Image (cartoon, helix red, strand yellow):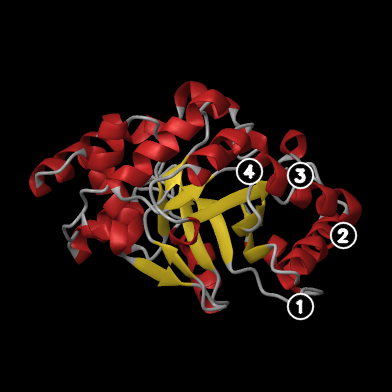
């Protein structure tokens, strides 16, 4: 499972492990055990958010982990509703307190719009205000790197108009069946590393016959193929699970997808997220 030892280097020189543990939907009282199990398996990149309601548990898992704190990369996200400098400053300190850490490795603006208006109104000014707070916390060494999530090119351009730090990261919905190639290219051009959340399409890809056949060809599971795909796109892959068996198998991705098969996966579209379409990130609104 060599992938667990591999890193990318962000534009500010900070190294980030290529494979991480997503913790969306992991209850606060189960998060510490999930983090602890992941660290034992070899994970060093743990991703949470204020919106997940489990920062306390994640922080406990990090603080009591079997490895030193500086070997772990911990990310969290500013609640999407916060589009104000003072509120953002207070929320950054709130995350540090909940996590029980004196420093966060990466903090993101969770969405360019509040969730109840996702892909809706214009919050450019509010994002710039929240970004200023993140820049200051970064300057003060409370946060080692800063970034955004769910930002389209237009959202990034709005931010860059006044930013003194170009976002180090943009965390996006990226999976076979949803590959935003233009946005990936734009981020690469700006030296913004993309993190792929829901690389297994929140489970929706499991029933795709073309993907199943390709996984069989490589002698791997569908999740392993999907995680490998996002890694070969040059993104950090963040599959989420509280199950240690899944954590272990998600890291067994030491194989190579051919160029032709990468193109097939990149060209896939139209994934039905089923009941999960209720979430704005899957419905696009």
- Looking at the rendered image, the disc whose residue lies closer to the viewer, 1 or 2, is 1
> Image height check: is 152 above or below 189?
above
Q: What element carries label 1?
A: loop
> Image height check: is 216 above or below 102?
above
In the displayed structure image, the side of residue 202 where residue 250 appears, left or right: left
The residue that mark 1 highlights is 164
Q: Is mark 2 on a helix, strand or loop?
A: helix
Is residue 196 visible from the viewing direction of this image? yes
Q: How far apart are marks 4 and 1 (CA)?
A: 27 Å
Q: Distance between the residues labelled 3 and 1?
A: 24 Å
Residue 210 image position (x, y, % from top left):
21, 40
Is residue 122 visible from the viewing direction of this image? no
Residue at 35 percent of width and 37 percent of height: 37
The residue that mark 2 highlights is 125
Question: In the picture, which quadrant includes the N terminus?
Answer: bottom left
Q: Are marks 4 and 3 in contact (CB under 8 Å)?
A: no
Mark 4 Cα shell of 10 Å, populated few (<14), some (14-19), many (≥20): many
**Between disc 3 and disc 1, whose residue precedes?**
3
Q: Do the residues labelled 1 and 2 touch (CB within 8 Å)?
A: no
Residue 219 vs residue 139, the one in the foreground: 139
In the displayed structure image, the side of residue 178 where residue 56 appears, left or right: right
The residue that mark 3 highlights is 94
**Between disc 2 and disc 3, whose residue precedes?**
3
The residue that mark 4 highlights is 99
Mark 3 Cα shell of 10 Å, populated few (<14), some (14-19), many (≥20): some
């Amino acid at each position: 499972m060599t992938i667990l030892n591999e890193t990318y280097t962000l534009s500010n020189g900070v190294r980030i492990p290529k494979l991480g543990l997503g913790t969306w939907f992991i209850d606060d009282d189960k998060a510490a055990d999930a983090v602890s199990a992941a660290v034992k398996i070899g994970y060093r990149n743990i991703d949470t958010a204020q919106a997940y309601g489990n920062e306390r548990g994640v922080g406990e898992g990090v603080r009591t982990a079997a490895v030193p704190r500086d070997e772990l990369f911990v990310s969290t996200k500013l609640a999407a509703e916060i589009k104000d400098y003072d509120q953002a400053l207070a929320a950054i300190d709130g995350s540090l307190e909940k996590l029980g850490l004196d420093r966060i490795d990466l903090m993101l603006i969770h969405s360019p719009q509040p969730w109840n208006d996702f892909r809706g109104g214009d919050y450019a000014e509010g994002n710039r205000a929240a970004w200023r707070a993140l820049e200051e916390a970064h300057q003060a060494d409370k946060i080692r790197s800063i970034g955004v999530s769910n930002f389209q090119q237009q959202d990034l351009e709005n931010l860059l108009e006044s930013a003194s730090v170009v976002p180090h990261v943009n965390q996006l919905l990226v999976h076979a069946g949803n590959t935003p190639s233009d946005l990936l290219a734009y981020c690469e051009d700006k030296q913004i590393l993309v993190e792929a959340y829901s690389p297994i399409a929140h489970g929706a890809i499991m029933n795709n016959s073309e993907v199943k056949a390709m996984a069989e060809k490589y002698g791997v599971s569908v999740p392993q193929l999907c995680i490998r795909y996002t890694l070969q796109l040059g993104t950090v892959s963040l599959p989420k699970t509280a199950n240690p068996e899944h954590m272990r198998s998600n890291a067994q991705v030491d194989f190579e997808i051919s160029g032709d098969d990468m193109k097939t996966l990149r060209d896939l579209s139209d994934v039905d997220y089923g009941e999960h379409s209720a979430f704005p990130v899957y419905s696009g609104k």
